[in-house]
Every structure is written in structure tokens, then in C-alpha cells.
Amino acid sequence: MRRNLIKLAFLFPIFLMVAGCTTRSVVENAHPNFDAAASIFKDRCRLAGEKIYKTVDDVDGVFVLKVRPEKTDLSDQFELHDPYGRDFRGDIYVRSFLHGAYAVENNLPEKLPADFPPHIAYAFADAIDPVDGKRYRYTGKVEEPWLTDKSYLKGHKRFVFSRSLATGPAPRYGITYDDISTRFEREHWIAGSSLKVIDLQTNEVIAERIGYLFDSEQGSKIGGRVPWLWAANNSCPSFGSRHAFAAQLDQTAIFVEKVLRPAFKKIAQMSSAKIAQ
């Protein structure tokens, strides 16, 4: 339930903007720059995709080297805020790497199949606070408030997280992102993204995802339209072709888990094996 509330908090303003348009005000390919932008986008898509050079098993925690900002302007043509990689903001972005959050907020059962893909996540995630420059460790847990507060429905669960000053060694594996757009690409409303997983001991990039998207209506704001949100409909790798911005949340953690396999994965597989017996 809380997961749905978090999604609504992120998407409700978007739906309000979309709801104001019962039909698209501009035909998808009517803009005079569409053909040129589409051609450039097609060329960039040849560079897009996931490259996983190495995988690591039984990872307990990750270092979120760059936290996504609390606010971005999704209509700004030239701000390099990585529209393709748009995900949760601030602390909630770090929280998306914590074990239990995804399952509880999507009402998934406790016992998942061993091959269940997204996403099990980690026991902790570290991040640098940009205000004081210190490293903090984020952890989370599942609570059942109905056990002590009968105003909650029986069986209700929620995920809560906290952070404390990190005192031990930093996690070995870091996660970062960059906007790789050029001025030329942004002039055509194309944005490029790089998401990397780095072995911080060897300074080796062990996986990278390159993604591109473009706004087919070239920045149109007719009817409250938000250009970089609608651009997610034209993306590679694809998020989908309609209201695709809703699929962007959790994308970072899901990719990272393909590379850094959580220690919890082994626990889930053992639980599933017991169920099968």
C-alpha cells in the first residue's frame, strides 16, 4: 500500500497534467524537426544497451555514489539531469536499494520463486550527504503496525528506513549515473544516460547501461505537456510506448541487481526449495 502511495506522490502531479489533455494536441510526427530528431535518435540507439562484464554474488550492501536530486525541471531542454535515468528522488532513491521495500509496497508474498527477478535488494546502502559531506548508512525493516495499533487492518505491513553515520568500511561496489548528452543532441530533444556499477577497490567498471530517449514533439508544452516525461515513450532500451514514465521508477536498483546479486537471493532460493519439498 505504501509503495502505491509513494508512486502516487511522484506521479500524481504528472497525471494531473496529462488529464488536462483528452487528445494529443500535436500529431506524433507533425513537428518539422521530427524526422531529423528521429534519425539522430535511431543512430544513438545503436550505442544503447546493457554491458555486464562481471557479476558478483552474495552482496550485502552498495555505495550510492550519486543521489538523484530532490527537484529537476522536466521541461528544461538543456539541463543535464539524466531524463532517461529518472527514478526516485533524494533519500527515497537510496531506499530503493534496501531489502523489503519493493516486496512490501507491491504486496508480494514473503516466499518468492527462486527465479523472481525484481527485486530483492540489499541489507544496507551507503551514500554521502551533500550538506555535511559525511557517509551515512541506510537500513530498513518491515513493520506490522496492526499488532500494536488496531486502527490498522490485520496483516498490514509497511517498510520503514533510517540512516546513521557510517563508521565501518565503505561498500566495495558503487553505483553512479551521468547525463552523457551533447549540446547537439539536446537541440533535438535527445538525452543520453550512463548508469555504471564500479568496483571501488580496483576502480573497474564492471557493468554499464547506456540509454537514450527523445521528445517526438520537440519540447511542446501544449495542454500542460511535460517534454521529458513524454520522451520516455521513445526510449532505448525501451520503457514502453505509452505513459512509459511510470516504468522508470526502480529502474536503477533492478539493473544493479543483475550485476551485484544480493545475499538475500540465496535466502530466497533456500526458502523456495523448502516449499518445494
Image (cartoon, rainbow, N blue to C red):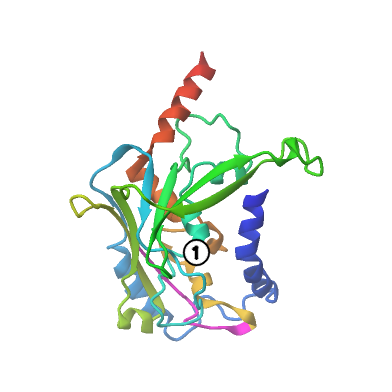
In depth, the one of 277 and 240 nearer the eye is 277
The structure residue drawn at horizontal position 67% and vertical position 41%, both measured from the top left corner, is 157
Asked if one can make out residue 6 in the rendered structure from this viewpoint, the answer is yes
Looking at the rendered structure, the secondary structure element under dot 1 is helix
- Determine whether, in the image, residue 74 is placed left or right of residue 50: right
Is residue 214 on the magenta stretch? yes
Which quarter of the picture shows residue 134? bottom left
Can you identify the residue that label 1 sits on? 90
The structure residue drawn at horizontal position 41% and vertical position 69%, both measured from the top left corner, is 130
Q: What range of the chain is rendered magenta?
A: 211-222
Q: Is residue 57 above or below residue 273?
A: below
- Determine whether, in the image, residue 156 is placed left or right of residue 77: right
The structure residue drawn at horizontal position 50% and vertical position 23%, both measured from the top left corner, is 271
Q: Is residue 192 above or below residue 96?
A: below
Q: Position of residue 108 (x, y in %)?
A: 60, 38
In depth, the one of 270 and 214 nearer the eye is 270
The structure residue drawn at horizontal position 50% and vertical position 24%, both measured from the top left corner, is 272
Q: Position of residue 44 (x, y in %)?
A: 30, 68
Dot 1 amino acid type: Gly
